[in-house]
Amino acid sequence: MADQELEHLQYFEKQLVARQVRPTVLQPLWHVAGFLLGAGTAVMGERAAMACTVAVEQVIDGHYEAQLKHLGPDEEELKTSILKFQAEEVEHRDIGLLNGAEQAPAYPVLSAAIKAGTKAVIWVAERV
């Protein structure tokens, strides 16, 4: 999963440069927050870490789906990449589910909180 996530990050970083789009000014904060979220859930145990993976990947799947709806016929290469990445995110979600995510302590609360936070980060990043 880590190799695929790195590939996604590198691809989108190249797209920012090619399209002359600046990343959100809060990107360094998001990196720290993502690390802390992952580390925090890992401290809670493997199932909590898997719950984190499932929650984040569910939100990213929806985010990719929304992005695909905005792309026109002139964006086939970008669409193809997003579809590939989306499939990989769904695969990551499924790995989390197979590894006990739903058995994490307080799974419904943990999952809802992580999803809400992830959606909030995306919403802010699109505006700042």
Image (cartoon, rainbow, N blue to C red):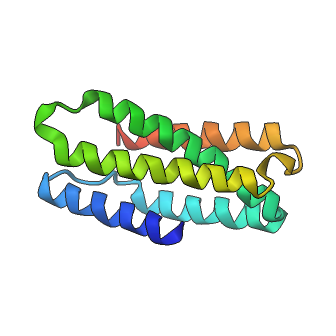
Which residue is located at x 27 percent, y 47 percent? 80
Depth check: give the residue in front, 119 or 98.
Answer: 98
Residue at the image position 13 percent from the left and 51 percent from the top: 19
Q: Considering only vertical position in the picture, is 100 above or below 44? A: above
> Where is residue 110, by image quadrant?
top right
As drawn, 7 above or below 119? below
Taking the image as shown, residue 73 lies to the left or right of residue 126, namely left
Q: Is residue 110 above or below residue 92?
A: above
Instruction: From the top left corner, tell me how far across and down residue 59 is, in percent.
Output: 54, 39
Looking at the image, the residue that sits furthest to the top is 69
Q: Nearer the viewer, residue 61 or 17?
A: 61
Q: Is residue 40 visible?
A: yes
Front position in the image: 42 or 124: 42
Query: Where's the C terminus, which quadrant?
Result: top left
Residue lying at the far bottom of the rendered structure: 3
Q: What is the residue that sits farthest to the left in this orientation?
A: 74
Residue 51 can be seen, yes or no: no
Residue 12 x, y percent position in the rendering: 29, 57
Residue at 46%, 48% in the rendered image: 87
Image quarter of residue 9: bottom left
In the rendered image, residue 1, in percent from the top left (x then y), is placed at 54, 66
Horizontally, is 100 left or right of 113 in the view?
Answer: right
Percent x, y of residue 31: 49, 63
Name which residue lies at 67% across and 44% down.
114
